[in-house]
Amino acid sequence: MSSLLEGIPLVDHHCHGLVRGEIDGHEFESLLTEADGPGPLHPSLFDTQVGLAVRSICAPLLDLPRFASPEDYLARRAELGADEAARRLLAVTGIADYLVDTGHHRDLLTSPVELAAYTDASGHEIVRLEVVAEQIIGAVEPRDLADALRETLYLRAQNAVGFKSIAAYRTGLDLDPSRPSDADVEVAATNWKRASSEETVPRLVDRTLIRFLIWTAVDLGRPLQFHIGYGDADVNLRQCDPLLLTPLLRATAGLGLPVMLLHNYPFHRSAGYLAQVFDHVFVDVGLALHNVGSRASAIVAELLELAPFASVLFSTDAFGLAELYAVSTTLFGRALTAFFDDGVARGFWPVAEAERLVGMIASGNARRAYGLGDP
């Protein structure tokens, strides 16, 4: 089965940079999944869907046989060096545009420009809202925070293609959809600063301030991403159901602002419903695909049960390891091809329609939503 993605320049609409320099085996495994790393009761994270996928998909790209042992894989990766391994692994992805969330471990990871340079692609920045507030709260008085956030986000928007909220990690997604006033922001900022010290600023977990950031981003008209569902142990998964965002989606409907629901697993069917009933909602299953491995085709098919094809995007949410880009794009290509080939075989759509829709999902929808223009 040849991939219907062949020859289509992909837009990875949500991803992260690569770890700079060399890493050891423990560090590599800690980046494979959402776990902190291998532990005494789970000694190897290669014994996962993504671990097997790396050995199957990535090993031949580093001149090893499929399913080379983890030890041989890590030794060969070290022999080639991080940069050469990254060039080989990224070269097979077909990604033409990387939309990079720069708000997490920014100093440890490659920038959008550095990431894209491995394959002469294009790199674009996605600004993480909560981090912006954390960076400036120490330098402003509570009464000035609302204006400072508006000004800072306006300036960041000049060089970014979108914003992202990690409200799912900080408060959960059950957010009051109303817009906070400047007075509300001052009260919340006062409480936040009271909990701070000269050395540290607690991470932002205030619902009022997060809602203000979201509405300020909405006013700037850039696409707005939300982390949904599956994540690391810091997230309370019960509070990450996209259906909790329904009031906010109603409040932002008709404003012309694309809202991107990222990852969505295990709530991807609910996300597909939201994409069907709200014109401005877009969905993906990015982070899930390399983690579910052999089940990727089932997850993509379930997303596409209800989600309009014009509302589905591609992302890897690869973080730190070039391997995650190679695995995600390969699994996504196989899954999308299997879904549309099955429809052709059963007479639901002709080949030409399948090819057109695959092009939309792989690239065209993201280019339209983010205003990227032609590749």
Image (spheres, helix red, strand yellow):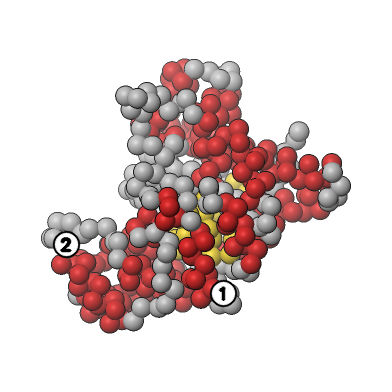
Relative depth, front residue between 326 and 211: 211
Badge 1 marks a residue whose secondary structure is: loop
Q: Position of residue 253 (x, y in %)?
A: 56, 74
Classify 373 as above or below 43.
below
- Residue wearing tag 2: 196
Q: Residue at x 42, y 50 (%)?
A: 237
Badge 2 marks a residue whose secondary structure is: loop
* Sequence-wise first label, 1 or 2: 2
Classify 55 as above or below 337.
above
Q: Position of residue 32 (x, y in %)?
A: 44, 34
Q: Residue at x 48, y 71 (%)?
A: 248
Q: Residue at x 62, y 60 (%)?
A: 273
Which mark is on residue 23?
A: none
Res 76 visible: no
Q: Position of residue 332 (x, y in %)?
A: 63, 42
Q: Residue furthest left?
A: 198
Res 268 visible: yes
- Residue wearing tag 1: 253
Residue type at the position of mark 1:
Ala
Judge left or right: residue 130 versus residue 187. Answer: right
Residue type at the position of mark 2:
Ser
